[in-house]
Structure formats: structure tokens, C-alpha cells
Image: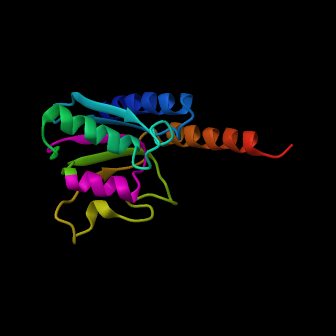
Amino acid sequence: MASREKMALAIGQAELAADAGEVPVGAVLVDGAGAVIAAAHNQTITLNDPTAHAEILALRGAARLLGNYRLLNTTLYVTVEPCVMCMGAIVHARISHVVFGAYDPKWGGAGSLYDLASDVRLNHRVSVTGGVLAERCSRMMQEFFQARRKTAAPR
């Protein structure tokens, strides 16, 4: 299944984020033919940039590559449901489809908390598929935050 293969690439990006001490979120953007045009992982700490989410960095990379901020006929694979900021950028970029792994009931902007993907008040609708390799994506997040709490716990 192609979506599982592309999500596996996003998981690889999330692992890079975790290795760097970043929240393990990875994203891969593919064109209409299924070719990868951008891949990124969270770098908010590394870049001292609150907007340096995996999705935003992937969109920036693809826009530079294509020479256009409109990323028509593309699909974004991301390990965790995009937040509101990222969904706003996805809508502005005219991404066709978002495929994500783990749902995010605290920050999710693609259906869990907010649903910007299908808000009829916006000028673009994004189709969304959630739950692809969800268990693996959720486990990465849980393990990351469990380890972080252990190191922050008083002795």
C-alpha cells in the first residue's frame, strides 16, 4: 500500500527529529505521480523557530523546489495530525490530501480538535485520511514524552 510506504518515510523523518531532541514529527510531501518532492522533521528547538514544524518545513522546501507557493495535486504524509497552524498553511498551499498517523486530541487541526480541512468558510478543502500506521506513530510520541518526563523528574 503506497500510503503505508510514504508514511514509513515520514516516520524516518520523525526518528531524525527524536535523535535531535525534537518532538518526533516527520512529514513527506509527494506530487501527483507519487514522487517525493520534500521531506522534513520538527526543528523548532534546533532553529529557535516556533513555526519550524515538520509540515511547514516540508511545504517551504517544496515551494522553493517548484518555484510556487501553490502546491497543487500533492499529498502530505505526516506522523501526527497537523496542528491549526500547519493546517492553515496546508490550506493556503492548496495541498490536495493529508494522510496522518496519530490523532492529536489536544492540538489537532484536521478533525480532532478543529477541522480546518473541511471548513466551508475557507476557499479550499483538503481531503484527510487519519490513522495510517497510527500505533507506530503514537508510540513514538508516547516514548519521547515518557523519556522527557523521566529526565525532568526530581530525584
Residue placed most toward the observer, 135 or 65: 65
Residue 139 lies in quadrant: top right
Residue 33 drawn at (x, y percent): 16, 31
Image quadrant where one finds the N terminus: top left
The residue located at (38%, 59%) in the rendering is 84
Residue 1 vs residue 146: left or right? left
The residue located at (61%, 39%) in the rendering is 144
The residue located at (27%, 51%) in the rendering is 90
Residue 155 drawn at (x, y percent): 87, 43
The answer to if 81 sits in the magenta stretch is yes
The answer to if 143 sits in the magenta stretch is no
Residue 35 lies in quadrant: top left
Q: Report the span colored magenta.
A: 72-92
Residue 149 vs residue 7: left or right? right
Residue 26 drawn at (x, y percent): 42, 36
In the rendered image, the residue lying farthest to the right is 155
Residue 153 drawn at (x, y percent): 78, 45
